[in-house]
Image (cartoon, helix red, strand yellow):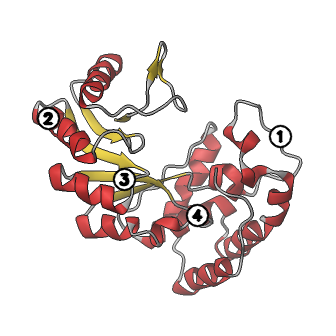
Amino acid sequence: IATKFGFMHGDNGPAPGTGLDSRPEQIRRVAEASLKRLRVDAIDLFYQHRPDPNVPVEDVAGAVKDLIQEGKVKHFGLSESSAEQIRRAHAVQPVAALQSEYSIWWTEIEENGVLAACEDLGIGLVPYSPLGRGYLTGKVNENTTYASTDIRSHNPRFTPEAIRANQVVIDLLQRIGAQHDATPAQIALAWLLAQKPWIAPIPGTRKLHRLDENLGAVDIQLTADDLSEIRDAMSQITVVGHRY
């Protein structure tokens, strides 16, 4: 069981978008409340939602270290942290996993030192949005609409113009998929799995058949030629729209 701390809390629990709070006393409060709600003796993996600029990461790591020593938490995780923050935290309490956005159309962690830090320190990478918030499934088109409460309703990559422009990415996934009898989503996940053996993507889904589809990516072995073709093609594609 993995859960997180680090957002300010409202009356109904964590309230993303209202601010960050990774003070040690708040970390402990969140841990205690999570244990009670989950009805478990220990949290397997306790992530910091986002770096808190008001709290040194060493203090965050130290607070989780205390919880680990007390048997209330088993492993410490970070999310969206920089390479420097990862290394500083790891020096206080070993980091077991890092969540960061990583996909065929968002590879920033390859360039900013985050992926290298994970490899150097033996930290597992847990890419979120590995299917580009659904776009990389190939099921989104310029007529797709989202509720106002859906983050994609105001995401720059989900405007009709961006959806049309980025169709070239789907075309690439479909082309590779045709060689493996696989869907675009499966190729996008298989690409991630082929990058490093310590990568475990977390695609979200609400439908059982999509879960089965995603799991099928594990059995797809992309060849060196496939991987080169994808890299070469993506290097020539300018993805339209920022990720947020």
Classify mark 4: helix, strand or loop: loop
Whether pointer 1 and pointer 4 mark residues with C-beta atoms closer than 8 Å, the reply is: no
Residue 98 shows which numbered tag? Answer: 3
- Of marks 1 and 2, the one in the foreground: 2
Identity, as a three-letter code, of the amino acid under mark 2: Asp
1 horizontally vs 155: left or right = left
Q: Position of residue 226 (x, y in %)?
A: 59, 81
Identity, as a three-letter code, of the amino acid under mark 4: Trp
For the residues labelled 1 and 4, the Cα–Cα distance comes to: 23 Å
Which quarter of the rendered picture does the N terminus lie within? top left
Determine if residue 118 is in view: yes
Classify mark 2: helix, strand or loop: helix
Q: Quadrant of residue 44?
A: top left
Among numbered discs 1 and 3, the one appearing first in the sequence: 3
Between residue 107 and residue 174, name the one nearer to us.
107
Residue 106 shows which numbered tag? Answer: 4
Residue picked out by circle 1 = 145
Q: Position of residue 71 (x, y in %)?
A: 14, 31
Among numbered discs 3 and 4, the one appearing first in the sequence: 3
Identity, as a three-letter code, of the amino acid under mark 3: Leu
At horizontal 73% and vertical 54% (from top left) the residue drawn is 157
Q: Position of residue 240 (x, y in %)?
A: 75, 64
Among numbered discs 2 and 3, the one appearing first in the sequence: 2
Mark 4, Cα crowd under 10 Å, few <14 / some 14-19 / many 20+, is: some
Residue picked out by circle 2 = 66
